[in-house]
Every structure is written in C-alpha cells, then in structure tokens.
C-alpha cells in the first residue's frame, strides 16, 4: 500500500463531488474550452520532514511527509468585463474546500488515511486575475497534506 497514492486518489475522488463542474482531470495540462468549467488536480511535490538529529535511525523509521497537490479551477473566459468571474471562482473554491475538509467519515476518508498525526492545511490560492496575468478565469488552490510515512507499509 502506498499511502501517498491512496491520499491523492481520495482527494481526486472528493473533487469529483463538486457540483457544477463539467469535467475533472488529473495531471493534465490545459483543457479545451468546450470542457469547461473544469477541475484539474496535479499530484505535484512531496517533502519529508528534515531530521537534524538521530541521523543513525533505522531505515524502517517512520517520518512525517507533506504532499502538496495543486488544484486548479478553470472556467470559460468572460473577457473583457469578467463580470462574474470572481463569484464563480470563489464559489467553486468553497465547494472544493468543503469536499476536502469534510471528508472524515469511514475507513477510506482523508482523515483516516492521514491518521491522527496527519493534517490538511489550506495554504492559499492564486488566480490569473491580476495585472499582467491572462485574466481568463482560473484559480489554483494549494493544499499541504501531512501524513506519517511508514516504510513497512509497502
């Protein structure tokens, strides 16, 4: 069992419960306009806690690891006025955060996968709605999901 794989699969499954999205993608670069609004999840990076002590630890010692998936909401462009882009993106943002943070029931929930020592942290968002950006209607959410890496699990 690869806990990273299970956690990312569960996040993607939870994203697919977001109402109002036409298509869902994982590790895809760009989506054609006819498939919008879309959510794209990128598996992205993972970082292990840096140990400064106990350098002689056994290879089977557990460690805290943080997965940093990127979740993008892409909606059809409303250029040049972009009258409701901010409302739409913010509504989807809240729906996504609810889907992720309210997944705490059952053995396959995110809460059970990350365990008692794990955590899910909302690290913020970035949009393309700023000067010198495309202003098409895209928002990226940043999550940090901490879990205990146990080498003996796989």
Image: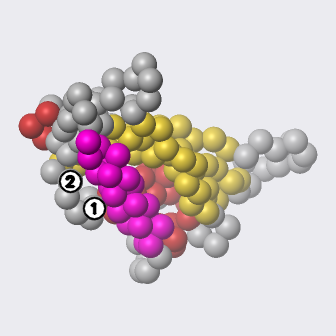
Position of 153 compared to 6: left or right?
A: right
Disc 2 on helix, strand or loop? loop
Query: Residue shown at 83%/49% (left/top)?
Result: 57
> Residue at label 2?
21
Q: Position of residue 82 (x, y in %)?
A: 26, 37
Task: Identify residue for label 1.
Answer: 18
Question: The magenta stretch spans which residues?
Answer: 83-103
Residue 120 higher or lower than 116, as above or below: above
Which residue sits at x=28%, y=31%? Answer: 136
Looking at the magenta stretch, what is its main secondary structure? helix
Q: Is residue 131 left or right of residue 57?
A: left
Q: Is residue 38 above or below residue 60?
A: above
Residue lying farthest to the right in this orientation: 53
Rendered image coloring scheme = secondary structure
Q: Residue at position x 63%, y 41% from top?
A: 47
Is any atom of residue 141 visible in this view? Answer: yes
Residue depicted at 23% across the width and 63% down the height: 19
Query: Do callouts 2 and 1 mark residues in contact (Cβ within 8 Å)?
Result: yes
Q: x, y percentage for residue 96?
A: 37, 59
Residue 150 in view (yes/no) = no
Question: From the viewer's perspective, is residue 97 above or below residue 82?
Answer: below
When the figure is inspected, residue 18 is found, relative to residue 50, above or below; the finding is below
Is 115 part of what is drawn in magenta?
A: no
Q: Position of residue 100 (x, y in %)?
A: 43, 63
Closer-to-camera residue (45/59): 45
Using the image as rendered, state which of residue 64 and residue 141 is in the foreground.
141
C-alpha span from label 2 to label 1: 6 Å
Find out whether residue 91 is within the magenta segment.
yes
Foreground residue among 125 and 83: 83
The residue at the far bottom in this view is: 105
Secondary element at image label 1: loop
| Label placed on residue 93 | none
């Amino acid at each position: 069992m690869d806990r990273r794989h299970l956690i990312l699969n569960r996040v993607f499954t939870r994203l697919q419960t977001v109402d109002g999205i036409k298509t869902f993608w994982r590790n895809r670069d760009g989506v054609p306009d006819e498939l919008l609004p879309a959510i794209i999840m990128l598996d992205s990076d993972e970082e292990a806690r840096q140990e400064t002590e106990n350098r002689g630890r056994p290879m089977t010692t557990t460690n805290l690891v943080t997965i940093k998936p990127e979740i993008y909401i892409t909606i059809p462009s409303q250029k040049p006025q972009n009258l409701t882009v901010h409302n739409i993106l913010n509504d989807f943002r809240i729906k996504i955060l609810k889907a992720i943070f309210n997944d705490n029931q059952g053995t396959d929930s995110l809460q059970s996968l990350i365990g008692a020592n794990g955590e899910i942290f909302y690290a913020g968002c970035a949009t393309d709605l700023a000067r010198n950006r495309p202003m098409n209607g895209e928002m990226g959410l940043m999550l940090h999901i901490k879990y205990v890496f146990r080498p003996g699990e796989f």
